[in-house]
Image: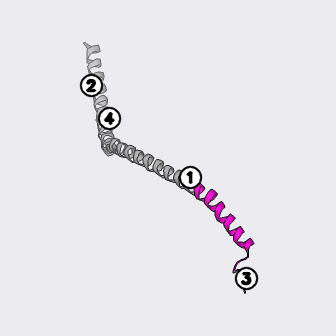
Amino acid sequence: MNDPLFPPLVLAIWAIGLGITLVVFVPLSVVLLHRLWRTAQSIQFYAREALTAAGGIAGNTGHIGALDHTIGVASTILTTALAIEQKLNAATGVLGRRAERS
């Protein structure tokens, strides 16, 4: 009854696996987590810059509604200017005919 619970080969394989894990996978995990953390910081930095730029764009495009109103007013002015032009052309024609008679 002096048999060990685990054979020495199993313990050796276990020790080798544990050693490989500690030597390879733990440092690899630390490196990958550090790269992930740096990438997340970079994304956060660029997101902050994008938010600032979006605020500037919103501020610069906030007056587009006023431009729509300006287009409406300009259309009215153009219609009035065309009516004035027609009346001036008629008056010019009348004055031109009077000048020819004289």
Proximity of marks 2 and 1: CB atoms separated by less than 8 Å: no
Sequence-earlier tag: 1 or 4: 1
Q: Dot 2, how many residues are within 10 Å of its Cα: few (below 14), some (14-19), or many (20+)?
A: few
| Residue 15: x %, y % from top left | 67, 66
Tell me the distance, in whole angstroms, between the alpha carbons under discs 2 and 1.
88 Å
Sequence-earlier tag: 4 or 3: 3
The residue positioned farthest toward the bottom in the image shown? 1
For the residue pair 25 and 51, the one nearer the viewer reads as 25
Query: What's the amino acid at mark 4?
Result: Leu
Q: Give the extent of the magenta segment.
A: 5-28
Which labelled disc corresponds to residue 78?
4
Sequence-earlier tag: 3 or 2: 3
Which labelled disc corresponds to residue 31?
1
Which labelled disc corresponds to residue 91?
2
Q: Residue at x 28, y 22 (%)?
A: 92
For the residue pair 36 and 25, the one nearer the viewer reads as 25
Query: What's the amino acid at mark 2?
Result: Ala
Which one is closest to the eye, mark 1 or mark 3? 3
On screen, residue 54 versus residue 98, left or right, reads right
| Residue 56: x %, y % from top left | 35, 42
On screen, residue 76 versus residue 26, left or right, reads left
On screen, residue 27 versus residue 1, left or right, reads left
Which one is closest to the eye, mark 1 or mark 4? 1
- SS category of the residue bearing label 3: loop
Q: Is residue 43 above or below residue 5?
A: above
